[in-house]
Amino acid sequence: FQNYQGLEEAVYRNIGACQELAKTTRSAFGPHGMNKMVINHIEKLFVTNDAATILKELEVQHPAAKMIVIASQMCEQEVGDGTNFVLIFAGAMLGLAEELLRMGLSVPEISEGFEAACDKAIELLPDLVCNTVSDLRSVETVTKALKTSIASKQYGNEDFLAGLIAEACVGILPSNRIQFSVDSIRVSKLLGAGVQSSKLVNGMLFLRECESDLKTVKDAKVAVYTCPFDMLNTETKGTVLIKNAKELLNFSTGEEDLLSAQVKAIVDTGVNVVVSGGKVSDLALHFANQHKLMVVRLNSKWDLRRLCKTINATALPRMTAPTPEEMGHCSVVRQDEIGDRNVVIFEHLAKEDSRINTLALRASTENILDDLERAVDDGVNNFKVLTRDQRQVPGAGACEIELAKQIAKFGESCPGLEQYSIKKFAQALEAVPRALAENAGLNPTEVVSKLYAAHQKFKMVSIQEKMEENGANKGVDIETGDVIDAAEDGILDQYLTKHWAIRLATNAVVTVLSVDQIIMAKAAGGPKPPKQSGDWDKD
């Protein structure tokens, strides 16, 4: 086996690998983050500044860097955002930990200090809350709350997209808000037009055409079948002996009559739209057109399940006439043309009926569409976070600088050697406003010193009193480089995202630092087996 041990070989190597990874995604942070062109193992091209996607497609091999990746993926799973924050913060902490190790501090002292500082940060975080989303059923309030997270992905379109996502989420928010499911917001990507042409559909939209001649049905009663829309084959094999032409004709007309009777039985229950999960035979379609039935075919069983949820139907395994309870209801089912694509839309005109909403996204290229989808995904996940905890902290680097200031003060009061690492933890928090400023083309050192000055001017005001001039909310304006009040300008981050990101980043860093030996197993020695000589004969 190969063995790397000690500070030089193991710890510094691991720190170096994690820093390289953090450097990769650092320039993609914030609204002015640069895009990355990632070509994955199957040569698919991604152009994105979403750290979660970059990490997923990069397939990081280094074991220590993998730990940081796992931490950021956990953050993605827990709150659906904050992946890049975890990477940048962890990278900064490891860089500063290396300085402390070279100064002669031991790993346990550094780890203890980091953990103490992390606990302190999580204890201070509730005091920094500057806004609570009071009404999750108000589109306007939710739009403001989601704007910041969408701006970091789609800067310039955040107002429009936040409004669209807020409307979609609020429209299907269940009475018990904790039951909100991210899966209830579907996305359909349609090439052409621009981002501003995207729209919301109360219901579901499928990129398919109708099978039947009838293209629009109002006040639709829908029967959903998981089987093909065709004659059911018998379970057993049967042999029919036909003696003359008349019997042959009777045999085929018998089959037709049977299918006609089946379709008529379905129509007699009041059904005017049939959705099938399998193929639609020509004969069945002929009878459907005769009876003015609209027929839609969906290939995916997931689409069928979601459609059943949307229109409140039961999927039937055989072509039988549905009972009123098994039927689905929908205001309009229509075939429409968006760009050059035909789509089938199941729409509820009354907002209350809709249980799934679809965003029809438009953009000029596939890459922009994919990026838009990621922005929507982030927005919906942020709404999900708000259903769990409505608190928000100031963005634009304000929250990090305030925490850094208070943790540095806390470090001064610690008597042991861990005070060094507590102060370094505070310094690592500066990496966030630094990255924001750097990506916006500002001078990071100047921005951080301006922010510190603004935060020192004012004392923390207790939450009970009015927060008049509260320095804790001072962040950086990425356009001008001036100091602004993040809370007033509506630059807000979710409290839970910050809470988990700080916690997960610290855990990952402490784990990476506690590794002092890397042992890699090698293939066992011994003679190599003789090479087989392919398809040759023995002689």
Image (cartoon, rainbow, N blue to C red):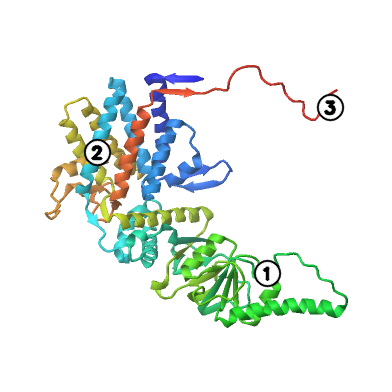
Q: Position of residue 434 (x, y in %)?
A: 31, 40
Q: Amino acid at mark 3?
A: Asp
Residue drawn at x 59%, y 43% is: 42
Check residue 232 in the rendering and tell me which mark sits there, or answer none: 1
Secondary structure of residue under mark 3: loop
Question: Residue 119 got which mark?
Answer: 2
Sooner in the amino-acid sequence: mark 2 or mark 1: 2
For the residue pair 251 and 302, the one nearer the viewer reads as: 251
Q: Alpha-carbon distance for marks 2 and 3? A: 72 Å
Mark 3 neighbour class, 10 Å CA radius: few under 14, some 14 to 19, many 20 or more: few
Left/right of residue 244 with respect to residue 98 in the rendered view: right
Residue 164 sits above or below residue 127 on the image: below
In the displayed structure, 504 sits above or below 246; it is above
**Name of the residue lying farthest toward the left:** 465
Q: Residue at x 70, y 67 (%)?
A: 233
Q: To which quarter of the image does residue 249 belong?
A: bottom right
Nearest the camera: 332 or 366? 332
For the residue labelled by badge 1, is the local secondary structure a helix, a strand or a loop?
loop
Which numbered disc covers residue 537? 3
User: What percent of the width, then of the height, locates residue 93?
Assistant: 32, 33
Residue visible at 44% across and 69% down? 202
Task: Residue at 14%, 44% (x, y): give it.
Answer: 457
Against 54, residue 252 (above or below) is below
User: Residue 211 at x, y = what percent?
Assistant: 63, 72
Quadrant placement of the C terminus: top right
